[in-house]
Amino acid sequence: MGLSLRRWLRISLLNLLIVSLIGILLRYKIAFAFPFFEQKYLLDGHSHFAFSGWITQVLMVLLIWDLGYHKGEDCLKKYRWLLYGNLLTAYGMVILFPMQGYGPWAIGFSTLSIVNSFFFAIRYWKDLNTMNQKSARLLWYKAGLLFYIISSLGAFSLGYMMTNKIMHQNWYLAAIYFFLHFQYNGWFFFAGMGLLVSNLEKIIPATKQLKLIFWLIALACVPAYFLSVLWMPIPPVIYWIVVVSAIAQLTGWLMLVKLILKNKAALKPYFLAKGRPLLILSAIALTLKLLLQLGSTHPSLSQLAFGFRPIVIGYLHLVLLGVITIFILGYIISRDLLPAGKYFMPGIWIFISGIIINETLLLLQGVSGLEYIIVPAINELLFAASVIMFTGILVFNLNSYAPALSPSA
């Protein structure tokens, strides 16, 4: 790859390590005394860097690599400065948000990150337009880029409210959930699906079916935003559109699963065995997420879900770690994109065990909270889970620099 795929993937994995380290500090600060950082400011830095420094960075790298695969590596050099731009703004945010929260410098770097994303989306969209428009993967990529841009409206609204001290609770939460929804249900999800479909199309001759699946999920994405704000007064017609959207997305996903299972024999040789279990885990997590999403359309369940912080945090981590991060790691491994030492996969499984423990503890904390029951040492246990995740990430980061185990790596 003209942009040194392995180097950029290693940088992205290092950023995941930084995200995890900040997660440890956040959990330590809750469980023990740690006066050096303001909790909310540190959380702002953690979330912005997780989105920009880890997931967006690695998705940009993988999308550029996929473009080079189909168009040749000559087209890739023009993306180098966009990758550097995203990286620079991400590091600026991870330093400045813990120091000042939504201060002028932090907002400045956040704005530059969004501007950089605009340039990336425009550049990539233009390159997609020069390719075979019959390909289903182009639909997923373009939708991901479009939702990437749309999500910035939430970030700009939030920055405006914070700068002007507008503390209307409903508007504040609506802006946050708008940004989150179109990032993880839009940009992250559709870009990841584009990578998957890009490979499926080479093996499964079912372009029409893949496009139908796309439209079922994509058209439901915008109204599905209201799933995040069902606690606000919304007209009945919007509510029923939201219910239909949740059903449509689950239906589209199950159709894709059926298509993959029908062709699993043909797909197996194309995805390395060591990466397939991660893709399966990601698929299980996505199925669970879509079922929970459908369940949350029930008003009483929606009130419970958004009324308890551990449940909200658990859901976000289910999507960002269980669905997106595990998929990205599984994709990199199954496509043999990065050399790996012998402890790389053990590190991956340590990390995943930490995710499972973390999700279980958050679920336990949330459910017990409904009955006003305090789980003994829950904060200490969640801190331990964050340490496990960090340990796994550290192990596979170190082993990403080891000599390749397979000739094709």
Image: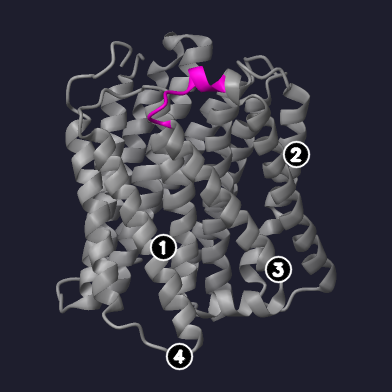
Q: Residues within 10 Å of mark 3 (few under 14, many from 20)?
A: many
Quadrant of image for the C terminus: top left
> What colouring style does the render use?
one colour
Quadrant of image for the N terminus: top left
Residue named by callout 2: 215
Q: Residues within 10 Å of mark 2 (few under 14, many from 20)?
A: some
Task: Looking at this view, name the residue that lies furthest to the bottom.
Answer: 372
Residue named by callout 1: 359
Residue 21 pos. (x, y %): 22, 55
Task: Looking at this view, name the residue that lies furthest to the front.
Answer: 265
Marks 3 and 1 sit apart, C-alpha to C-alpha, by 22 Å
Query: Which disc number belongs to residue 326?
Result: none
Asked if the residues shown at circle 4 and circle 1 are in contact, with their CB atoms under 8 angstroms apart, the answer is no
Residue 393 appears left or right of 271: left
Mark sitting earlier along the chain (4/1): 1
Q: Secondary structure at mark 1?
A: helix
Q: What are the residue bounds of the magenta stretch? A: 267-275
Q: Which kind of residue does numbered mark 2 sit on?
A: Trp
Q: Which kind of residue does numbered mark 1 sit on?
A: Glu
Mark sitting earlier along the chain (2/1): 2
Q: Which kind of residue does numbered mark 3 sit on?
A: Thr
Residue named by callout 3: 297
Marks 4 and 1 sit apart, C-alpha to C-alpha, by 19 Å
Query: Residue 303's quadrant in the figure?
Result: bottom right
Mark sitting earlier along the chain (4/2): 2
Residue named by callout 4: 372
Give the tally of numbered discs. Answer: 4
Q: Residue at x 57, y 56 (%)?
A: 289
- The question of residue 66 being in magenta is answered with no
Asked if residue 19 shows in the view, the reply is: yes
- Looking at the rendered image, the disc whose residue lies closer to the viewer, 3 or 2, is 3
